[in-house]
Structure formats: structure tokens, C-alpha cells
Amino acid sequence: MSYRPKNTRQSRDSSAYTLQSRYANTLDYHSPSSPPPPRSPSSSNPAFLREQQAHARYSSADLYALDHGTGRGEEGVLMREEERGGAPSSDEEEDGAGFASYGDFEAAGKRRSSVQMGGQRQSFRPGMVSHPSGFSTRSTFDPTYPKPASASTSKFPTTPASELVDAPILSRADWTPGEAMREKDARDAEKKRVKRERVVGDVRAAGRGAGGWVRRNWKWLVPLFVFLGVAAILLCYFLIPRTPTITFNSPKIPDPALTSDDPSPYVSAEDPTGFSFGANLTLAIDSSASYLPVHYRSFAITVRLQETDGIVATQKWDAGEIKVQPKRVTSYQFPIQFYGNYSSSSNPTYQIIRSSCAHIYPTTYRAPLNLTVTVSSEITGVVGTKERSARLDAVDCPVQWSGTAA
């Protein structure tokens, strides 16, 4: 189907009229049965059209696109002729419906191809059309040009003109760098402020509502709070376990409180010196102040000499191994290990232990031991570690070194 744009008056001297008269029958109506009419040797045709005539058959749409730039350049000539009152000839008005190229002078903003007729050079932008001639002057990016039936155009996404919106171009005085980010930050800050004010308003409204309810019902709320406070105090008094005390002044404590059945105690007089032996220590745990059973999560015994405060024995038990009943005194016998390592035999703690546990001879005097027993414990239901101490005075050493000990 041929393309015929709206009838626009052409000048006889224009290149569009020359192309129409030369190639209307030669190119568009050519068929094998009707040979083309002879060409006038005196006609002045563009050099590139003479070259392409031997290779391709142009449609009217191609000629229209080719001559579009030239028609734009000759618009001023036609306007000046109309101002002088020149009337167009009958040939220009009665071209009839045929295959011709016309210049669309009303289209604005389209790409142009500058064609210099005669012997001058012709410059134009190659199109994106796959054509037997290898190129076309029709731009595939121009949505106002229709596609000719004889051309295969590359497909590009286009936007309908009805969906386009005209917007003015902003100058540097209309915007500043980072303006969009600042506006976004301002919007976010405004949203946070509104949300914060809404939360504060809800809290204040809830407070006002609670205050009004208390003012209306204070006569029975005050006795209720007093009763709940007294009940909480009583529950804490009876339900929270109390830390028991330890003592050696109890009828349940045997005499002596420190015993040993170790057959081979060890002592060394050479530097470095040391000693080691096993013993049994009996303690009385008094839980008479507690209304609940006492469960120990940890229980550790540390024995020190009162004279030097040096540690001579330690022992520890884990959770679940020791438990005492409430409102009573319970005696426990704890196996402990006495030991000590010293760099010199002149250490006072070592000298006291060595002399107090010396081998017994008829003329040997052994000084008694003065010990301080400290119990560090953690109790279920009580926060923190509690310590209780007791003094064990003038107790005999439960072992004696061998007669051959140095």
C-alpha cells in the first residue's frame, strides 16, 4: 500500500518536484511487462540516487523521507512566493493521487537530512532500516513517520504521544545538589515526629484515664494496697530461706571435732618443704531461723591458722550434696585434706603444723592448733554467696609424723 501524505504545494524548482517527475513512473510503477520510460540525459539528478537506482527499488515512503530535509529548507522560498502574490501553476495543483514525495512543513522537531542538489555533496544520518540498498534516510526513532511496506524496520520500544507529558527544564537556579535527599529526610523526620506525638498523646490519655479512675475509687483502693503489702511481707518472711550458721558449741558436736584415720601422713623438712594428710571435720549447721528446707547449690570449707592466717585445708561440694531441715541444728562430718607447699622451712605456717603434728615421744610437747573454719555457700532462693565462720581453739593435731621424718 502506497503512502501519500497530505497535499502540499511544491515549487517547480524544488528537488521534491524533480524527484516526483523523474521517479514516479520509473521506480514505483516499474514491472517486467512495462519497461521504464527513457531518461533524459540532461536531467540533473543527485549522484547518490544514480548509484542506488542500479541496486534498489525505492518506494514513495523512502523518497518522502529522503526529500524531507530538502523540503524543510525550501519552505522559506514558498512563503516568499506567496507574499509576492505568485499563484501556483496548474501542474502543481493537479498532480493527482500518485506515488510522489512531499515535504511536511508542519512537522516540528523531527530529524533533518541536508541534501545539496546539483554537484554538491549530500550529508544525512544513516537510518536503522534494513533495505536492499544498504541504508535509508528514514529514522526509526521518529514515531511520526509511517513504515513503508517495502522496508523491514528494527523494533524499538516507543511511547505513545498521548502518554507523554511536557515538563519545563529546570535551571541551576531552580534546584540545588542534594535537594531530593534533603526533602526525603525532611519527610521521614516529619513522619517520625507525627508518630512520636501520637504515642505521647496516647500515653497521656491513658494516664489521665487511670488518674480519673483512681480518684473515683480511692476509698477502696487504699485498703486493698495496704492488705497486699502486708501479705507480701509475710510471704517473704516465711517463704524465703535464711542462711544457716555454723558452730562448734553444740551437744551434737563430738569431742574432738577434728579427727583423722590417715595411716601415712606426709611431711618434708628439705626445701622446698610441705605436708599433707587427710582428716574429718564435724560442724553443726543451725537452721532454726528458717521456715523452709535449705538446699545448698555450693558448699566450700576453708581452714586457716589463727596465728598466721595461712590456709592449711580446703574442700568443696557441689549442688544437691548438702541439705538441712528447717528449725533445727544438724551436725555434718566433712572429709577434708590438709596440705601445704612452701619454698622454705622457715615459713611460720609450716613450722606450726610440723611442731603440732610431731611424732609422739614420752618427752615430746605438741602445741595445740588454733583454727578458723569459714563456710562459703550459695543457697537456692537466696541471692549471692554467703559466708559463715567459726573458731576451733586448742584442738590437737589428729596425726603424727613418722619417727623417721626429718
Image (cartoon, rainbow, N blue to C red):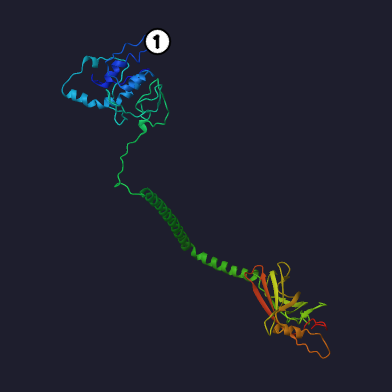
Mark 1 Cα-neighbour bin, 10 Å: few <14, some 14–19, many ≥20: few
Q: Position of residue 41 (x, y in %)?
A: 28, 14
Which quadrant: the N terminus? top left
Q: Position of residue 220 (x, y in %)?
A: 52, 64
Q: Amino acid at mark 1?
A: Pro
Foreground residue among 114 and 183: 114
- SS type, badge 1: loop
Foreground residue among 3 and 284: 3
Return the residue found at the far left.
Answer: 84
| Vertical side of 18 occupied by 363: above or below | below
Q: Tell me where residue 388 sits by quadrant.
A: bottom right
Which quadrant: the C terminus? bottom right
Left or right? Give the position of 114 relative to 31.
Answer: left
Q: Is residue 393 visible?
A: no
Return the residue found at the far top.
Answer: 33
Q: Is residue 182 visible?
A: yes
Q: Which residue is disc 1 drawn over?
A: 32
Q: How many marks?
A: 1
Residue at the spot 28% in from the left edge and 16% down from the top edge: 21
Left or right? Give the position of 269 relative to 98.
Answer: right
Left or right? Give the position of 50 relative to 77.
Answer: right
| Vertical side of 127 occupied by 314: above or below | below
Q: Position of residue 75 (x, y in %)?
A: 24, 26
Residue at the spot 23% in from the left edge and 20% down from the top edge: 13
Left or right? Give the position of 48 relative to 309.
Answer: left
Q: Tell me where residue 135 sits by quadrant.
A: top left
Q: Position of residue 394 (x, y in %)?
A: 74, 86
| Vertical side of 214 occupied by 147: above or below | above
Foreground residue among 34 and 322: 34
Q: Tell me where residue 140 sits by quadrant.
A: top left
